Amino acid sequence: MAHPEPTAEPAAVRNDGVGERHVLAVIPARGGSKGVPAKNLAEVGGVPLVSRAVLACRAARLVTHVAVSTDDASIAAAARAAGAEIVERPDDIAGDLATSEAAVLHAMDTHEARHGHPVDAVLLVQCTSPFIAAEDIEGVTAAVVEGGADSALTVAAFHGFVWRDTHRDTHRDAHRGSAAERDAVGVNHDKAFRPRRQDRPQDFLETGAAYAMDGPGFRKAGHRFFGRTETVRTDPARVLEIDDPHDLARARALAPLLDAGSETTAAAAPRPTRADIDAVVLDFDGTQTDDRVLVDSEGRELVAVHRGDGLGIAALRRDALKMLILSTEQNPVVAARANKLKIPVLHGIDRKDLALRTWCEEQGIAPERVLYVGNDVNDLPCFDLVGWPVAVASAHDVVRGAARAVTSAPGGAGAIREIASWVLGPSL
């Protein structure tokens, strides 16, 4: 990863009446992916895959802690923004041949060292299953922590006839032509007998989405299936695992149908209110503009801004929110726009996060009470500093993944007005 992991990563905790039982959901999310580049940051339904998995885990009643095991800084930023604890995965268990079990064991060790308590039950949740629901995670967890199972997994009812090609020896002759020919055999049925569905035993397909294990038992066994294993049925319509671009395209096409009303979608769209923030800090290029610059023959730069954004900024200022424009560009147009809006500006800033921290101290504002709006990777350090990192719709993919909320409008097209309506109400 690009930066060392802090030794005291804040716990990502959700605990609704579980008492002292500690249930850790681990989401392995490596940066390398051959089938789909940057797969774990790919968006489905406008939400990165890793964020979807984190949000589903956080919505599950019995899960008390959520950790993402990764070797990638961008994945870590997106997961942290969604509410996960980050476990930096060592190189020796980050390669193509590394097992998920190794990542889970390492995450357990790291979590226990950080927080000083043992993990009673551990989950393996795969973010490549985009439509996993909180109820699925809760189901496998309950099977272990309440039902007494040693391990549990999500499955879907399966009614198909499974076939397998085998080879049988034949006599070489002019008609058959080969001494070894393929012969298809039934795996879960006798091919000479075709019983009706209701007359056949019920088979289940492992979905690959969620597994739960007793913590000490998993340490001893070293693999996810041990002792008494319980299956937890899930909706077959939601079973999809993303391994290649075609899977990703299918998931994106299905998202409007399968995400409707889901807890994950609701959790993925947080909206700050006036009670949540004391200040709004705005990047300029690409956030208040569409990131294009017109240059005349004298070298003067011109940009286009949105009148609705000016209206929204004026309303935020009237509501006694502290305002600031923070830009890396040293450009007269930035200062002119700030003067027009009657808000202070800091521009020509190389380290925006340091400038923002200093400004917060001078204003007496806690960073967690700041809403920061950005669009590009140089905004990520500020995202890590504030309580409400917000990306405009046209932002870089990594920035959208790291944001706590994303506007529907792109930069320069009313995104700031949209944010103002979140904070002050839709009548703005």
Image (spheres, rainbow, N blue to C red):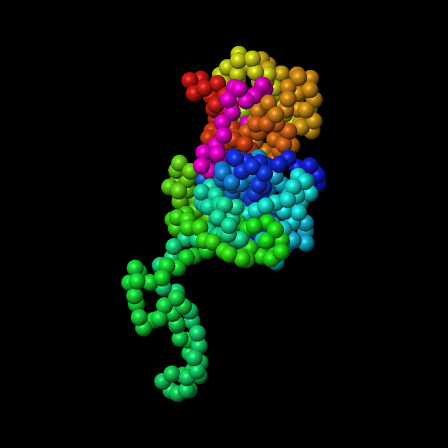
Q: Is residue 351 visible?
A: yes
Question: Residue at the location (63% across, 47% down)?
Answer: 108
Q: Quadrant of the C terminus?
A: top left
x, y (%) of residue 102? 62, 53
Question: 373 or 210, which is in the foreground?
Answer: 210
Question: 383 or 123, which is in the foreground?
Answer: 123
Q: Quadrant of the N terminus?
A: top right
Question: Residue at the location (68% across, 40% down)?
Answer: 116
Question: 419 or 62, which is in the foreground?
Answer: 62
Q: Is residue 154 magenta?
A: no
Magenta segment boundaries in residue numbering: 263-287
Question: Residue at the location (32% across, 73% down)?
Answer: 192
Question: 117 or 174, which is in the foreground?
Answer: 117
Q: Is residue 415 above or below residue 10?
A: above
Asked where in the image residue 333 lies, by quadrant, the reply is top right
x, y (%) of residue 174? 38, 87
Q: Is residue 283 left or right of residue 178?
A: right
Q: Is residue 54 above or below residue 100?
A: above
Q: Is residue 257 above or below residue 240?
A: above
